[in-house]
Image (cartoon, rainbow, N blue to C red):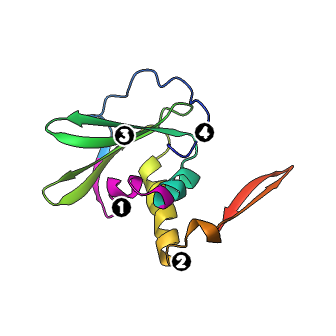
Amino acid sequence: MLARPHTPPPLGLLPDLDDGKERETVTGADVLSDWTSRFVVQLAVPGVQRVTSERAGRTEDVLVDVDTGSWAAVYAEGGRWLVRQGGPKPLWDAVEEQFGRWCTAGAPALEEFTVTVTPEGQSTRW
């Protein structure tokens, strides 16, 4: 994701975006256009890389987790958002859950986030 200052691992080949399960989603790829909501998404799927491509006459935002092989392609069609996902972890499900919790909390600004780092790990709260 764009919030990372370091070089991501090599992406390799994109998965077959015609595979996977497709469904409607209320959380569209537009959440990846805003810096704060993109940061919230990154918290949900920290190992992913984003690729935007033109395919089948539409723009698809594709999230790929190189480590697990999971992926999600989100796109608009007929006035609604659709997602197609594959791999062992449903990435967009995690995005929807995290983004929904953030919205329910009133979409706090970045200044309201707290990051705690200990020898046991890292946590982020708002």
Q: How many marks?
A: 4
Q: Which mark is residue 105?
A: 2
Q: Which mark is residue 62?
A: 3
Q: Which residue is mark 1?
A: 27
The Cα atoms of the two marked residues, 1 and 4, are separated by: 26 Å
The residue that appears at 58% across and 46% down in the rendered structure is 46
Q: Is residue 42 left or right of residue 25?
A: right
Which of the two labelled residues, at mark 2 and mark 1, occupies the earlier sequence position?
1
Q: Which residue is mark 4?
A: 5
Q: Is residue 126 visible?
A: no
Q: Nearer the viewer, mark 2 or mark 4?
A: 4
Q: Is residue 106 visible?
A: yes
The C terminus: image quadrant: bottom right
Q: Residue 58's image quarter?
A: top left
Q: Residue 113's image quarter?
A: bottom right
Which of the two labelled residues, at mark 3 and mark 4, occupies the earlier sequence position?
4
Does the CB distance between marks 2 and 4 fall below 8 Å?
no
The Cα atoms of the two marked residues, 2 and 4, are separated by: 27 Å
Does the CB distance between marks 3 and 2 fall below 8 Å?
no
Q: Secondary structure at mark 4?
A: loop
Measured as percent of width and height from the top left, residue 13 is found at 40, 21
Q: Secondary structure at mark 1?
A: loop
Of all residues, the one furthest to the right in this rendering is 119
Which of the two labelled residues, at mark 3 and mark 2, occupies the earlier sequence position?
3
Which of the two labelled residues, at mark 1 and mark 4, occupies the earlier sequence position?
4
